[in-house]
Image (cartoon, helix red, strand yellow):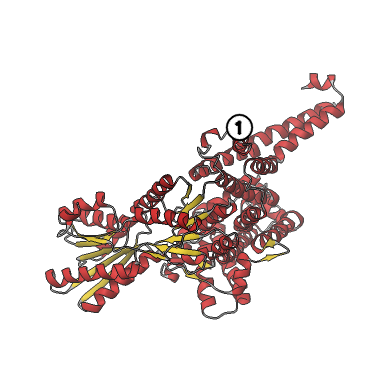
Amino acid sequence: MLHSFKPVVAAAAFGLAATLPQTAAAQDNDYTICFVTFSLQIEYFQQSVEGGERAAEELGIELIVFDPQADAARQVTLTEDCIARQVDAIVLDPIESGSLMGPIEQAAEAGIPMVTLDTRIDHPNILSLIGVEQYETSREFGRYVAGIIAGQMGGEAKVGLMIASSEVQIARRDGFVDAIRAVLPGVEIVAEGDGRNILERATAEAENMLTANPDINVIYATGDPQLQGALAAGLSQNRDIAFFGWDDVPDYFIPPLREGRLQGFLMQSPDFNGEQGVRLLVQHLNGEAISPRVSYIPTIVTPFNLDEIE
Amino acid sequence: MSETAATRSGFDIRMQRQIVVALVRYGMFIALAIWLVAMSVASEYFLTTTNLLNVLRQAAPLIIIGVGMTFVMATAGIDLSVGSIVALISVLAGSWLALGVPPLLVIPLLIVVGGLLGAFNGWVVTLGVPAFVVTLAGLTSYRGLAFVYSDGYATPIRDPVFAWIGRGDLFGINAPFLIAVVVAVLGWFLLNRTRFGLHALATGGREEAARVMGLAINRIKIMVYALTGALAALGGVVISARLSNVSPHAGVMLELGVIAATVLGGTSLFGGRATIAGTVAGALLINFVRNGLNLLGVNPYWVQVVTGIILVVAVLMNTVLNRKVESWARASTEEERT
């Protein structure tokens, strides 16, 4: 195969030998799938990609993973690169769903099917959505939080929200706020901080929020870096706050749960999302019908069910 | 040198000298050409219409804003606020379109807003605050304004005019790149064929001399920053249109890409030397490097490393090597005369 020698020529010309991909010579019969994730700085998406890589290995296909580092424009660019590479299918974890319409249209014209993880995009070329319902799940979680506030705080609380202004996390915020407002009019949302999914920033933002609002006694965080940052800020200021939040990072969140600092976190299965994304696309490429919606009910890990989950 | 010159014919040596000087002077264009050829050989997906049009569209905002940056750097200034102007323009575009303002009015208004933001930067620079500090303040505060104005929300835009700017085409060439070409041609004319361009270069070359000559230094500075602000706004329109989405996150770190493209092209950070064609080549090289490595399946993090290395090598060529080669060429020309 002449093709397999071509990258070597380029590498020799530019001294890029170290950067040569191991899988440069893909076999023609195999499928190549692009996996454009959200940001690999966040553990949630690392696990999602690991799930995808596991499925790819089992199915014997080539998986190309691209990390747009939470930049919507870069995600569009990388998706366009996938289309130019004429991959067989694309798994997409949208950063801003509106921005992806162009490349989705382009993929549709090129006959490249897609699935999305976590975020819904309505387009005939998006064959399936894999992941939990963000708004509904957060509303469920909100009801659990409302129960704690009603039972332990007399139905009144000052709540601080730590979010990242992404579509997914804004939906989680809205679901939570709607649930609390529906049952507990005595609860006040006193502050909202934007951690932008960056741990350093989330920590600083949470510290400022707690300093500015000494009466906050409940914090709800809509993603890992936000929850971690809020926990760190609460600990450094030695505050008595009930923390609740997302996501699936047991390593970080189980000890605080044991110590009583954290009252609950919502455990998704991001590796399930990544794995299903790849599997469904391969099934589709093999001519099988696939479901347009693949979801599961995530677990809320609390001090009460911790032992069962571990 | 004189020994070898004596043994060969004058024509040969002049030819050789011209080649060396040209190699160094046009190094960026040669590098771009070599890269394009190598990638065409290395990846069967590279030299396809889809891919080339994709990359030209991706490079368009860098070219558009880079033209402005070239003028700022010609005056020995720098503008770090362009990425944040893109974000502010993006959210303004979204809200004005949502209010029902016709897009053909929205776009000129946005460009005026960008121009005013840039003019404000320039005015503060003329007060004596270093451009780096002024525009660093712009970088944080303009993006802050974008977040305040939009509350952090990204919103889709469904306007047909914007859709055309972002994804439409004319004669098979996509609209963002066409806009970039028009901006680059006008920028080239302005820099090389008008008094304004000459004065901008003079300001950057030797500001005191330019002042003594009676040039209106302050007015020139305000104008170059205003131009960059206006082009950042146009770039913001193109970016929002390409994504059919407005977002206060738009253009994060874009200023660094723009500065890299401009410096890669051969424009001096210290002013006095500027090239629009170089900036265009720099913007294309950055995008083609990224695209080529992506198509080859190289770990995308390497792209950042490689881009950094290319930047340093290019600047080395543009400054140190270029100076050496040109003084060598001048010296041997003089030797020949004597």
Which residue shows up at 87% across the image and 29% down it? B11
Residue where numbered disc 1 is placed: A12
Based on the displayed image, in which of its 4 quarters is residue A26 positioned?
top right
Q: The residue marked by circle 1 belongs to what chain?
A: A
Q: Camera-side residue: A37 or B179?
A: A37
Left or right side of A121 for B333:
right
- The answer to whether residue A242 is visible is yes
Q: Camera-side residue: A250 or A224?
A: A250
The crowding category of the residue bearing disc 1, from other C-alpha atoms within 10 Å (few below 14, some 14 to 19, many at least 20), is: few
Q: Camera-side residue: B34 or B70?
A: B34
The image quadrant where one finds the N terminus of chain A is top right
Q: Report x, y in % for residue A259.
A: 15, 53
Question: Where is B94 relative to A162, above or below?
Answer: below
Q: Camera-side residue: B132 or A280?
A: A280
Question: Where is A201 relative to A98, above or below?
Answer: above
Which residue shows up at 53% across the image and 56% down it? A79
Based on the displayed image, in which of its 4 quarters is residue A182 positioned?
bottom left
Give the structural element (helix, strand or loop) at label 1: helix
- The answer to whether residue B206 is visible is no
Which residue shows up at 47% across the image and 52% down it? A35
Amino acid bearing label 1: Ala
Q: Report x, y in % for residue B254.
A: 53, 55
